[in-house]
């Protein structure tokens, strides 16, 4: 270390001149008056604890002019502030001067900004932004005070580097010996911890469906190591320029150098609801036609799909939150829905519509996904400048709301592993490269997927047609196949719906006259206008999600129980598994959501009936073993009907038996034995494929099979 040990924090003599001296004096009396006690308390723990929070309002009260200066010239004032605190002469137990970091909080309203509002007007000024952390890098040491030695005369120079985040090192000028040739002495220099993160605007603050903007934020010293992706924070900091990488360009990037970071425990500013609106909301809740109105308010320009729309309506409200059993087990309240099926059936359109309707939502389109993914990852990338970056995906960012995931089947492999936990336990755990952490994913998923081979074949199990494993499929509460069926009556109606919707939209926008008479246009407009205006529906949903948490009544329980046991006993008669306990929870969630949709704190029989009807509709579409015509949930849960799985198991036993006599088993031998076990020859290759896919059997040579079990 160079000569001036005690005042390294503000070394280099950059604070000088009469102006600064005046600031230092004013600040000295400010800290003396308002913060001396706090600094003395801190001195007990200094330097382990080395920051004090300074409320902007205190500065303003003390000296409004100083407060203005702090807003417009933060770096000068904060430096002077440190000097002022040093002048107070407070020492810790070991006699070191206590010079904490000054962390300003509570900026005035007009300095609380959205990322998008951080224009060049605010360069080098103090601003606050709210946001959610999307990614954060490793903690790295950064040169704080560089010690340079003149190669000729050996003189040493302490040069503070604090303002140089992106640029080159600041070196001393010409040495006293008249030369300018230095060596950087790393071992004599001091370093400070640095971490870079990216924050995104809170989804709640965006106008429906807007794209959220991001900004990079630099954290230093004791602000590092305290934050994770997904954290909701308010950063107060100085807006600074990033020098361009290329030389001849005049366009700069900006970043925020954090002065303070506060975590928000609660959600961001929620949607504002006036007392008048609340009255409107209550009125709508009592409307006997509330459910039809809800369904007719979801994507009215899309023809048909009533069941899907009803399910989506319930999903928007969700089940009862914060249900924790006495043993601490938490039940997920969020409903997950998957739309699978033919291309061009308005799946994407529907997702986009719901995205705009939901009070808080993220939309992830298969290809447009920017690598951040669905869950969370730790990877080495450019943002981390070679180090690790921890990134939060859509489900983390939308926690507390909804995620629309288009082309769900095109998920990256890491997400594929993480998504089970994210969907059911509603968290993602990352343990990689020394990073061990968890993220909340309390998010409802509305996903869409296209089949692998063009069209959806109702005679094949969904798991075989979509690039989604059954373990993930079975975590959806409802799965709807959306099929493009040839049906003349329906086709005609739908064509008319779509075409006149285009026509009417055209007439309204262009005001071209004489195409259709006014009355008719009005009637059609009404048909494709949401029954409940979208802005109001969003508020209605937000209100219900916040205030209503319905509880099951005995009548509702009875209904669900009856449906469940009926299906189970049907299963034991026909040797299938039509429903599992997981589905029971799905039914509860749907029934709760139905009660929530009319702001009822009780789940009544009618709610249970609605849930059952939706579930039944789904089972009839995707839960039927087409060979036997029987209801069988195993088609979803294992990807195969139980009848087929049973046969596959039988076949596996046959191979195991034969293997006792042969090293590898010949296909003809398998066929022979299978026949006596009642398995058709034409089923065998299919069954062998299942066994191979499950890793039970492999084929060492063409026509020969072996089990994978240890001998
Ligand atoms: P997918 O995602 O299912 O492949 P898209 O959402 O991209 O399909 O829809 C393709 C187009 O067809 C959209 O412009 C959509 O509006 C239209 N379309 C398909 N089905 C309907 C429908 N039932 N009602 C209205 N428009 C429809
Ligand atoms: Mg699509």
Image (spheres, rainbow, N blue to C red):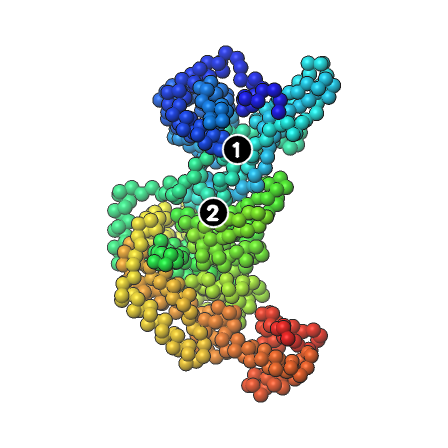
Q: Residue at x 52, y 13 (%)?
A: 17
Alpha carbon of mark 2 to alpha carbon of mark 1: how far? 26 Å
Q: Which numbered tag is attached to residue 465?
A: none
Q: Position of residue 222 (x, y in %)?
A: 50, 34
In percent of width and height, residue 153 lies at 72, 17
Q: Residue furthest bottom?
A: 676
Q: Is residue 599 above or below residue 62?
A: below
Which residue occupies the foreground of this view, 33 or 608? 33
Q: Earlier in the sequence, mark 2 or mark 1?
A: 1
Q: As rendered, which of 587 and 341 lies closer to the eye?
A: 587
Residue picked out by circle 2: 397
**Residue drawn where x is 38% and y is 66% of the image:** 584
Residue 391: percent from left, percent from top: 54, 46
Determine whether, in the image, residue 493 is placed left or right of residue 384.
left
Cβ of disc 1 within 8 Å of ligand 2? no
In the image, which is nearer the foreground, mark 2 or mark 1? Answer: 1
Badge 2: how crowded within 10 Å, few (<14), some, or many (20+)? many
Q: What residue is shown at x 56% (from left), y 83% (from top)?
A: 679
Would you name the residue on which mark 1 appears? Answer: 221
């Amino acid at each position: 270390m160079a000569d001036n040990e005690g005042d390294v924090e503000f070394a280099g003599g950059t604070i000088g001149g009469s102006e600064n001296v005046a600031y230092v004096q004013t600040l000295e009396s400010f800290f003396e008056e308002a913060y001396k006690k706090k600094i003395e308390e801190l001195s007990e723990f200094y330097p382990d604890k080395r920051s004090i929070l300074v409320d902007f309002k205190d500065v303003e009260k003390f000296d409004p002019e100083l407060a203005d200066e702090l807003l417009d010239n933060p770096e000068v004032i904060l430096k002077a502030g440190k000097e002022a605190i040093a002048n107070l002469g407070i020492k810790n137990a070991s006699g070191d001067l206590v010079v904490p970091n000054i962390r300003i909080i509570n900026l005035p309203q007009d300095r609380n900004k959205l990322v998008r509002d951080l224009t060049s007007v605010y360069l080098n000024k103090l601003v606050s932004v709210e946001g959610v952390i999307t990614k954060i890098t490793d903690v790295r040491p950064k040169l704080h005070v560089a010690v340079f030695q003149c190669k000729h005369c050996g003189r040493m120079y302490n040069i503070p580097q604090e303002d140089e985040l992106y640029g080159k090192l600041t070196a001393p000028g010409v040495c006293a010996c008249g030369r300018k040739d230095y060596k950087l002495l790393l071992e004599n220099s001091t370093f400070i911890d640095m971490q870079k993160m990216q924050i995104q605007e809170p989804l709640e603050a965006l106008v429906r469906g807007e794209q959220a903007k991001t900004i990079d934020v630099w954290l230093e010293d004791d602000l590092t190591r305290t934050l994770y992706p997904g954290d909701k924070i308010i950063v107060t900091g100085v807006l600074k320029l990033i020098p361009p990488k290329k030389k001849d360009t005049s366009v700069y990037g900006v970043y925020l150098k954090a002065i303070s970071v506060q975590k928000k425990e609660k959600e961001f500013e929620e949607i504002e609801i006036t007392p008048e609106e609340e009255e409107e909301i209550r009125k709508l809740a009592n409307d006997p036609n509330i459910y039809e109105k809800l369904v007719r308010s979801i994507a009215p320009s899309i023809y048909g799909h009533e069941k899907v729309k009803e399910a989506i309506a319930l999903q928007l409200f969700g089940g009862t939150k914060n249900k924790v059993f006495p043993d601490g087990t938490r039940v997920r309240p969020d409903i997950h829905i998957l739309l699978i099926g033919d291309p061009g059936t308005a799946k994407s359109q529907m997702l986009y519509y719901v995205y705009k309707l939901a009070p808080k939502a993220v939309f992830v389109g298969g290809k447009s996904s920017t690598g951040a993914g669905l869950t969370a990852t730790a990877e080495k990338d450019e943002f981390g400048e070679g180090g690790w970056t921890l990134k939060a995906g859509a489900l983390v960012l939308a926690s507390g709301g909804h995620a629309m995931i288009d082309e769900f089947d095109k998920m990256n492999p890491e997400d594929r592993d993480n998504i089970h936990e994210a969907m059911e336990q509603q968290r993602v755990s990352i343990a990689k490269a020394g990073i061990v952490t968890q993220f909340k994913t309390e998010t409802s998923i509305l996903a869409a997927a296209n089949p692998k081979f063009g069209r959806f074949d109702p005679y094949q199990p969904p798991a075989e047609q979509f690039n989604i494993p059954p373990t993930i499929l079975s975590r959806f509460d409802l799965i709807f196949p959306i099929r493009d069926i040839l049906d003349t009556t329906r086709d005609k109606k739908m064509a008319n719906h779509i075409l006149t919707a285009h026509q009417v939209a055209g007439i309204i926008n262009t005001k071209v006259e004489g195409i259709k008479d006014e009355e008719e246009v009005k009637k059609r407009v009404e048909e494709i206008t949401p029954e409940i205006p979208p802005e109001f529906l969003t508020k209605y949903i937000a209100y219900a999600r916040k205030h209503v948490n319905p509880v099951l009544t005995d009548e509702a329980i009875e209904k669900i129980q009856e449906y469940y046991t009926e299906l189970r006993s049907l299963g034991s008669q026909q040797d299938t598994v039509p429903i599992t306990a997981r589905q029971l929870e799905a039914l509860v969630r749907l029934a709760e959501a139905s009660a929530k949709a009319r702001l009822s704190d009780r789940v009544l029989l009618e709610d249970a009936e609605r849930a059952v009807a939706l579930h039944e509709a789904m089972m009839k579409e995707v839960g039927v073993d087409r060979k036997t015509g029987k209801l069988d949930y195993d088609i979803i849960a294992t990807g195969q009907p139980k009848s087929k799985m049973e046969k596959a198991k039988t076949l596996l036993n046959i191979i195991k038996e034969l293997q006792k006599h042969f090293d590898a088993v010949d296909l003809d031998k398998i066929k022979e034995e299978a026949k006596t076990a009642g398995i058709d020859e034409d089923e065998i290759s299919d069954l062998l494929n299942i066994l191979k896919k499950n890793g039970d059997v492999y084929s060492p040579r063409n026509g020969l099979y072996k089990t994978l079990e240890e001998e």
